[in-house]
Amino acid sequence: MAKLGKLKVTLKRSLIGHPPQVRRTAEALGLRKIGQQVLQPDNPAVRGQIRKLAHMLQVEEAE
């Protein structure tokens, strides 16, 4: 089985005005402020959270 890497996730847009479910998903990813970056494991659960917030995030593969 191939080892999964990490993803660098950056919040690019404000959470103001978004529904509570979107805010909770961002918080679950560890994102609270615009420009904040977090490293998350590259797995299906995290990919699903990222897909839900795709319009507000920038995602890069980390080494």
Image (cartoon, helix red, strand yellow):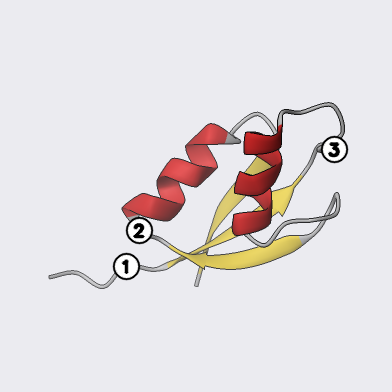
Q: Amino acid at mark 1?
A: Leu
**What's the residue at 87%, 33% (across, down)?**
16
- The crowding category of the residue bearing disc 2, from other C-alpha atoms within 10 Å (few below 14, some 14 to 19, many at least 20), is few
Q: CA distance from mark 3 to mark 2?
A: 25 Å
Quarter-of-image position of residue 48: top left
Residue 40 in the image: above or below residue 49: below
Q: Secondary structure at mark 1?
A: loop
Which percent across, then down, holds residue 36? 80, 59
Q: CA distance from mark 2 to mark 1?
A: 7 Å
Residue position marked by numbered label 3 in the rendering: 14
> Which label is found at residue 56?
none
Q: Earlier in the sequence, mark 3 or mark 2?
A: 3
Residue position marked by numbered label 2 in the rendering: 43
> Which label is found at residue 4?
1
Residue 11 in the image: above or below residue 40: above
Quarter-of-image position of residue 42: bottom left
Closer to us: 37 or 17: 17
